[in-house]
Image: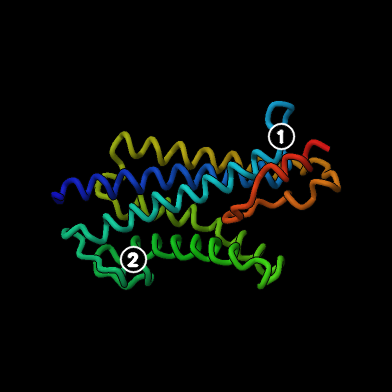
Amino acid sequence: MTDSVLWYAARGAGAVSLLLLTGVVALGVLAALRWRTSAWPRFLTVAFHRNLALLSITFLSLHIVTAVVDPYTSLGWSAALIPFSSSYRTFWLGLGVIAVDLLLAALLTSLVRGVIGHRTWRLIHWLAYACWPLALAHGLGTGSDSFSPWLFTIELACLGTVLLAVALRLLLQPAPLKPAAADVSIPDWADLGDVSAAATRQRR
């Protein structure tokens, strides 16, 4: 595999990861607001939020692997896992590593949610939302083509989407929650259970 292919693969996977994380944040806000319509019940927002998060991890893994094996950066696996340990664009790359660590923390704690308790899981889950601005800053500072028209357009679109989502979260009050649907009010990034049960509760 040539160096240019690895470079394009890393950049492409990174851009897709940012788009997916943007969707995760926006859907997380909609879930927190308990937004729904007759055509889009709230359990779909929760399920879509979770599945996008899992898909973002897939593309993020591709982004990391292609960046590490690219001989131009000479990162090494330690630089991909330990913040600010790389000699290549140390600060900006470190922000990306922190974003990955936060996302992994959200995933792993979701797998042991029953052990650590809901309060601890929820705190870590919400802290994981910090991975989005870190990922955006990482992309802007690390990429040599960050301000190319195609990538800068993606970054602006992601920024606008998240700012709109945050504004809605601050301005709007959550919709009233039916008691039967209380257990699906907070999306779980790594709960791989059957969504049909949530759908049944939501329709009651």
Q: Disc 1 versus disc 2: distance between alpha carbons? A: 39 Å
Which residue sits at x=33%, y=66%? 80
Q: Tell me which label, 1 or 2, sits earlier in the chain.
A: 1
For badge 1, the amino acid type reads Pro
Pinpoint residue 108: horizontal percent, then vertical percent: 54, 65
Pinpoint residue 95: horizontal percent, then vertical percent: 40, 62
Seen as rendered, the residue at the extreme left is 2
Q: Vertically, is 79 above or below 38? A: below
Seen as rendered, the residue at the extreme top is 39
Q: Residue 88 or 15: which is nearer the viewer? A: 15
Q: Which quarter of the figure has residue 178?
A: top right
Q: Is residue 201 left or right of residue 195?
A: right
Which image quadrant: the C terminus? top right
Q: Residue 14 or 194: which is nearer the viewer? A: 194
Pinpoint residue 59: horizontal percent, then vertical percent: 39, 49
Judged by depth in the image, the label closer to the viewer, 1 or 2, is 1
SS at mark 2? Answer: helix
Q: Vertically, is 79 above or below 30? A: below
Q: Vertically, is 73 above or below 34? A: below
Q: Residues within 10 Å of mark 1 (few under 14, many from 20)?
A: some
Q: Residue 4 or 156: which is nearer the viewer? A: 4
For badge 2, the amino acid type reads Ala
Q: Is residue 53 left or right of residue 174?
A: left
Pinpoint residue 33: horizontal percent, then vertical percent: 72, 43
Question: Which residue is under mark 2?
Answer: 80
Which residue sits at x=45%, y=60%? 99
Question: Which residue is under mark 1?
Answer: 41
SS at mark 1? Answer: loop
Which residue sits at x=79%, y=43%? 201
